[in-house]
Image: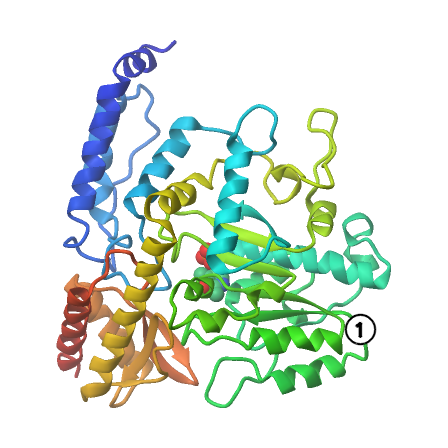
């Protein structure tokens, strides 16, 4: 064994202690360090280390060169995109995932697969899905949407008498995908899957809303003359967190043949808030569902779940049969037959541990509190004169713009000033043709005091505009 490896092995407890200290220092400062950097201090270039430093000195190098440029994206006032933090149990679960270093591709040598299955059952119950949905961990909502749409593609083939996974896309022909306000990752998924980005046809939404107009969707389906299609329903759009009427969309299957995929990346967590749970009504009727976990479950990157009612089609697409891996069991296929990966980390563990630690009640409190924070910021914006709300805060996102002259340049300057203040980080959008900002609340640490600080940072930045 190399002498540095031998030394680190001998001192492993102390070294993991130092690692803990470094993490604790970072986390202790998380709420007060600059929330984001527009130009992060670079970690000054260096060549490939030849001799190596040993872990203790390498940790010090990491802290010196790279830590200063890291954002506080896990902290309470990072409101860009939809970004969760990591609960104490989520962090601990991720550390132990690395320490255990299990390969959850197949059962038969470890309890790890069963732990993932138990976690999927927990999550299914948490967001209100029935036992008819099987689930598997993937790296994020983009991958969950991609896997769901791969199963949808196989289903369209089944309707047309073509096994796409065997015969290939050329045998399938064009497929139409309909959606009201799809997330950008749906286009990426369609590109990856060979269905093509232009397969996606956006359908009219309700007036002043991002939710699909179900009558317009019915009309678009009727135009297909009975050709099987894919509908992507949206349970939580990123700009205004609008929800399609999932029950009404699902009911259209009585009249038209389509696979119903629901992108509920963060919106599924509305089920945890009594005041918002109705928004997810009908989620269980979907054929496939995307739920992200590194957003509102507040586990570290990268984790999401892909749920589907058609495990058989999923296995047809993803199975990886070989003499050493065996054939998938139809009743209970190993995970390597269900997702793009073969070898897989025990990605479920942070989710398992945070649910074991805080339960549905603890995680429900996060969702309720985040929604209250969004409502409070929306109220502050509505009461002032500098900004204008572009939509009501339906759940956890506030979408707003400058009251006067909301040009792209002024919005960019506003956003830069907020970032430079170190107090908050928001991401831009264009909503109904108007340049805007979004403040998305999904961090377990955010409180009303943070909302006050964000509102002040916004007011100061607006006052400083030309
Ligand atoms: C964030 C998000 C995605 C993509 O999620 P990643 O985890 O970043 O891949 C997809 N759909 C919706 C609605 C989202 O909010």
Q: Quadrant of the C terminus?
A: bottom left
In front here: 289 or 433? 289
Q: Is residue 345 above or below residue 235?
A: above
- Residue identifier under label 1: 227
Is the residue marked 1 within 8 Å of ligand 1, measured from its CB?
no
Q: Is residue 125 above or below residue 384?
A: above
The one of 428 and 267 positioned closer to us in this rendering: 267
Residue 329 visible from this viewpoint: yes
Give the image quarter of residue 203: bottom right
> Would you identify the image quadrant in which residue 32 lies?
bottom left
Residue 15, given in percent of the width and then of the height, sits at 24, 23
Residue 243: image x %, image y %?
49, 75
Query: Residue at horizontal 32%, vertical 54%?
Result: 362
Dividing the picture into quarters, in which one does residue 239 lie? bottom left
Q: Residue at x 28, y 76 (%)?
A: 375
Name the one closer to the observer, 153 or 445: 445
**Apparent side of residue 297 relative to residue 198 in the rendered image (left or right):** left
> At x 30% / y 14%, what residue is drawn?
4
With respect to residue 13, does 34 lie above or below? below
Circle 1 Cα neighbour tier, 10 Å, few/some/many (<14 / 14–19 / ≥20): some
Task: Please provide percent x and percent y for residue 289.
Answer: 57, 60
Image quadrant holding the N terminus, namely top left
Residue extending farthest right: 161
Q: Secondary structure at mark 1?
A: loop
Q: How is the image coloured?
A: rainbow
Q: Position of residue 115 (x, y in %)?
A: 50, 36
């Amino acid at each position: 064994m190399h002498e540095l490896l031998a030394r680190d092995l001998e001192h492993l407890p102390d070294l993991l202690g130092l690692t803990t200290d470094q993490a604790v220092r970072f986390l202790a400062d998380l709420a007060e360090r600059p929330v984001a950097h527009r130009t992060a201090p670079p970690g000054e270039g260096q060549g490939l280390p030849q001799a190596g430093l040993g872990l203790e000195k390498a940790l010090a190098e990491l802290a010196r060169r790279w830590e200063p440029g890291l954002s506080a994206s896990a902290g309470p006032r990072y409101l860009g995109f939809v970004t969760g933090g990591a609960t104490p149990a989520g962090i601990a679960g991720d550390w132990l995932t690395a320490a255990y270093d299990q390969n959850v591709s197949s059962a038969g040598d470890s309890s790890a697969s069963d732990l993932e299955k138990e976690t999927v059952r927990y999550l299914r119950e948490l967001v209100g899905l029935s036992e008819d949905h099987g689930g598997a961990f993937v790296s994020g909502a983009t991958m969950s949407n991609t896997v769901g749409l791969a199963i949808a593609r196989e289903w369209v083939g089944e309707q047309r008498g073509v096994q796409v996974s065997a015969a290939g896309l050329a045998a399938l022909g064009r497929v139409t995908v309909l959606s009201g306000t799809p997330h950008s990752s749906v286009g990426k998924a369609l590109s990856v899957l060979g269905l093509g980005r232009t397969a996606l046809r956006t359908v009219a939404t309700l007036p002043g809303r991002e939710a699909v107009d179900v009558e317009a969707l019915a009309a678009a389906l009727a135009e297909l003359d009975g050709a099987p299609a894919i509908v992507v329903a949206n349970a939580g759009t990123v700009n205004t967190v609008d929800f399609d009427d999932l029950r009404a969309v699902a009911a259209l299957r009585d009249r038209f043949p389509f696979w119903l995929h629901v992108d509920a990346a963060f919106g599924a967590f509305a089920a945890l808030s009594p005041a918002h749970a109705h928004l997810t009504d009908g989620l269980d009727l979907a054929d496939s569902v995307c739920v992200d976990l590194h957003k509102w479950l507040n586990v570290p990157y990268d984790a999401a779940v892909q749920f589907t009612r058609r495990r058989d089609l999923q296995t047809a697409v993803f199975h990886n049969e070989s003499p050493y891996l065996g054939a998938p069991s139809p009743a209970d296929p190993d995970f390597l037959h269900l997702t793009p990966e073969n070898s897989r980390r025990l990605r479920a563990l942070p989710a398992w541990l945070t649910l074991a630690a805080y339960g549905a009640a603890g995680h429900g409190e996060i969702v309720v509190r985040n929604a209250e924070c969004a409502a409070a910021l929306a109220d502050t914006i509505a009461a002032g004169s500098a900004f204008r709300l572009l939509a009501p805060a339906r759940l956890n996102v506030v979408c707003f713009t400058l009251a006067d002259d909301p040009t792209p340049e002024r919005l960019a300057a506003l956003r830069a000033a907020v970032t430079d203040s170190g107090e908050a980080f928001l991401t831009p959008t264009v909503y109904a043709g108007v340049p805007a900002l979004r403040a998305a609340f999904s961090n377990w640490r955010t409180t009303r005091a943070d909302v006050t600080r964000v509102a002040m940072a916004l007011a100061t930045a607006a006052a400083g505009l030309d």
